[in-house]
């Protein structure tokens, strides 16, 4: 479904991603982990059209995305849940959700299905988004992305700044999406949680893929966390 071929990303002439290859099949959940500054978010920005690769190709279902505007990429079926959530805090929960909806004959049914998945959003639909907790705002950001009926859901640091119980809730929601066959690309700093959740993970360091493999391969690598992730649990 998604393929990156030797993708490089530079800002102001300074290269921060040095030739990343990535493949993601339909129905697969792939994670990218690594410390701050590893280039994880820059890879996502290249996929979503928010940063133009300085070289290499990004393909979605065989179509080259390089140079395509972010809104066109979104219409192809990619949805990003950004780091920091970025909900519209001066709008109500319901207004935030409408911002993510496609205008078609399925939109009402999709909205109802989404509210069933996120009951707290139904209960607080008339409240401004700045009244929500961090975990509730994260649910709102995920729900807003799902209302676009994406074929590929991309999540950038969905557990950032959340309490452990709230992180558990977010991952329970993501597990439900996985069971329904949702294809996901997940960026996280929480290495152990990501390796446990994803089918396969890439470990980035200084803009390069250092290690990659399936869950059982990475969980058994005693040197992985110490070498590439600074010993984090």
Image (cartoon, rainbow, N blue to C red):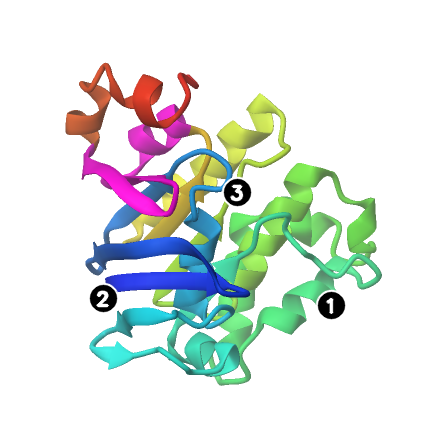
**Magenta stretch holds residue 194:** yes
Q: Residues within 10 Å of mark 2 (few under 14, many from 20)?
A: some
User: How far across and down, in percent of the image, does residue 177 sit?
Assistant: 38, 49
Residue at disc 3, secondary structure = loop
**Magenta stretch holds residue 41:** no
Q: Residues within 10 Å of mark 3 (few under 14, many from 20)?
A: many
**Relative to 216, 172 lies left or right:** right
Is residue 186 shown above or below 93?
A: above
Name the residue tied to disc 3: 158
Name the residue tied to disc 2: 1
Q: Residues within 10 Å of mark 1 (few under 14, many from 20)?
A: some
User: How far across and down, in percent of the image, does residue 101 sit?
Assistant: 57, 74
Alpha carbons under labels 2 and 3: distance apart: 22 Å
- Could you tell me which residue is drawn at 41 percent across and 62 percent down? 9
Alpha carbons under labels 1 and 3: distance apart: 22 Å
- The residue closer to the viewer here, 189 or 226, is 226
The part of the chain drawn in magenta is 191-214
- The residue closer to the viewer here, 181 or 72, is 72
Residue at disc 1, secondary structure = helix
- Could you tell me which residue is drawn at 39 percent across and 28 percent down? 191
Dot placed on the residue nearer the N-terminal end, 1 or 3: 1
- Could you tell me which residue is drawn at 37 percent across and 47 percent down? 207
Labels 1 & 3 near each other (Cβ < 8 A): no
Residue 95 numbered tag: 1
Quadrant (top left/top right/bottom left/bottom right) for the C terminus? top left
Dot placed on the residue nearer the N-terminal end, 1 or 2: 2
């Amino acid at each position: 479904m998604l393929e990156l071929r030797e993708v490089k990303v530079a800002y102001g002439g300074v290269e921060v991603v040095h030739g990343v290859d990535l493949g993601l099949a339909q129905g697969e959940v792939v994670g990218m982990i690594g410390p701050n500054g590893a280039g994880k978010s820059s890879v996502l920005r290249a996929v979503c059209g928010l940063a133009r690769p300085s070289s290499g190709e990004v393909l979605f279902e065989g179509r080259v995305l390089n140079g395509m505007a972010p809104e066109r990429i979104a219409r192809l079926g990619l949805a990003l849940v950004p780091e920091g959530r970025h909900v519209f805090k001066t709008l109500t929960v319901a207004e935030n959700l409408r911002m993510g909806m496609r205008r078609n004959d399925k939109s009402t049914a999709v909205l109802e299905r989404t509210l069933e998945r996120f009951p707290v959003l139904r209960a607080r639909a008339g409240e401004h988004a700045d009244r929500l907790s961090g975990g509730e705002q994260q649910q709102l950001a995920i729900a807003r992305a799902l209302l676009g009926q994406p074929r590929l859901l991309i999540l950038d640091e969905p557990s950032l700044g959340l309490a452990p119980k709230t992180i558990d809730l977010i991952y329970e929601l993501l597990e439900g999406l996985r069971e329904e066959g949702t294809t996901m690309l997940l960026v996280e700093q929480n290495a152990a949680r990501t390796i446990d959740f994803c089918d396969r993970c890439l470990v980035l360091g200084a803009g390069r893929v250092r290690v990659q493999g399936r869950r059982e391969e990475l969980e058994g690598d005693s040197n992985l966390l110490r070498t590439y992730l600074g010993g984090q649990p």
